[in-house]
Amino acid sequence: MESDWSGLTAVLRNFSTSIVQTLRQRGFQAYLVGGCVRDLLLGREPKDYDVATSATPEQVMEIFPETYAVGAQFGVVLVPESAVAVNASTESAAKSRAVEVATFRCDLGYSDGRHPDEVRFSSDPREDVARRDFTINGMLLDPISGDVLDFVGGRKDLEAGIVRTIGDPERRFAEDKLRMLRAVRFAARFGYAIELATFAAMQKLASQIEVVSRERVRDELTRMLTEGQARRAFLLLDESGLLRHVLPEISAMKGVEQPAEFHPEGDVFVHTLLLLENLPRPCPLTLAWGALLHDVGKPPTFRVAPDRIRFDGHVEVGVKMAEEICRRLRFSNDETEQILALVDNHMRFGHATRMKESTLKKFLRMPKFEEHLALHRADSLASHRNLSTYEFIQQRRSEIPVEKMRPAPLVTGEDLIAQGHVPGPKFCEILGAVEDGQLEGRLTAREAALEFVRREFPA
């Protein structure tokens, strides 16, 4: 998988360079720009390549007839790989990929806090860079000579490990409030500090994040959760004041004590962030969100009983809260279903070693059980650090053949009708009892199963 991705990015790098060459041959300025320049200077392989040029969208589309005008009013078009000749041996590996080509521009006004009210195209790359978000994303690279055009001090901030807005931070964030979340994500991903004036502006404007579409917020938070530095990201969200506006349910975890014998690490917030640190990398979206929300029901169910702190019903409450969060952030139905399943089942591991064989096998064959197991492992490491149940589950999974985990039915609905049963809810109870007998090894043959039904469920 990694080699495939490496080959794909090599195609994109060569393709974007060929776009730059073609534009220059037609007399236009053209450079690589943005995150790909940052990543290349850091020695990382960019996932995407963007090109900035003095050519207008109409001129770009004339040069590359197969372009897609996805944002021509803002000077942005996509150039698919088929529009420029690339290495034939690798073209098929990424033929659906495209490079974003944007015209140098100056943005005038942002009434909606996202899109410019007016765009003026420019021939000066300095003007184009001045309207971008952060200095580390504001450099231009000549892919042919290797020269870097840095009008904003991006290289210096890259070397110092600083996330800083280009120009006045309040103005940059007023243009697009999502940039506050992006500042957190970049600082977490690269282990950088957010420059003081930039961070102060985030704290001042944090409440304005609520005007950003929920889908855009969800996508930024998902990147924070899955890029491997989720704990630092959520600490920065909290310190900046953004957390209580994007996920007040997570902010509410702060200061909610837990019984020390089970959670020596601290309160629910501390535990949750430690858990995120122990997730696998790369981490599936649903696992990341399930981990974040697994204890979301604890703050509203907190009580101090005579014996110890308790969270009665926190799983059931948590499932309802997680569902509301998933709907609010507009996750798909499939994503929501798996996130809720993770929240709903995370406490069942505590009973695994005492489960009946049939119950255990049904538990182990839950959809995407690997995510449930990964959550349990991270949960354990973030609290008591006892992995005995995790090891027990791993051993049982290796011991149980697939045919024993999901045995072929010995009795069908037609068999029940033949015995005189009337189709209805009782069918599920009978067939479930037969399956339990199979899973526990008590029923291994069809005739024995039919006799079991006649004896236990007479028609």
Image (cartoon, rainbow, N blue to C red):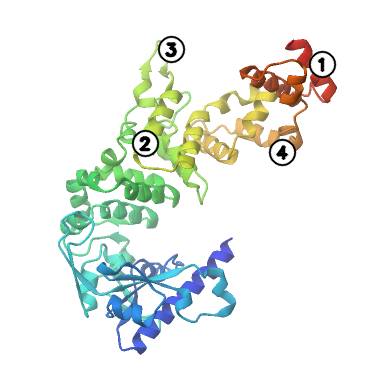
Q: Which residue is mark 4?
A: 398
Q: Secondary structure at mark 2?
A: helix
Mark 2 residue crowding within 10 angstroms, few (<14) / some (14–19) / many (20+): some
Q: CA distance from mark 3 to mark 1?
A: 50 Å
> What amino acid type is highlighted by mark number 1?
Glu
Mark 3 residue crowding within 10 angstroms, few (<14) / some (14–19) / many (20+): few
Q: Which residue is mark 3?
A: 307
Query: Is 445 located above or below residue 371 in the figure?
Result: above
In front of the other: 265 or 352: 352
> What amino acid type is highlighted by mark number 2?
Ile
- Residue 325's tag is 2
CB contact under 8 Å: marks 4 and 3: no
Q: CA distance from mark 2 to mark 1?
A: 49 Å
Compared across the picture, whether 124 is left or right of 357 comes to: left
Q: Which residue is mark 1?
A: 451
Indicate the quadrant containing the C terminus: top left, top right, bottom left or bottom right.
top right
CB contact under 8 Å: marks 2 and 1: no
Residue 453 figure quarter? top right
Q: Secondary structure at mark 4?
A: helix
> What amino acid type is highlighted by mark number 4?
Ser
| Marked residue nearer the N-terminal end (2 or 3) | 3
Query: Is 36 located above or below residue 239 in the figure?
Result: below
Q: Secondary structure at mark 3?
A: loop
Compared across the picture, whether 167 is left or right of 65 comes to: left
- Numbered disc in front, either 2 or 1: 1
Q: Kindly tell me whether residue 180 is visible in this rendering.
A: yes
Compared across the picture, whether 374 is left or right of 301 comes to: right
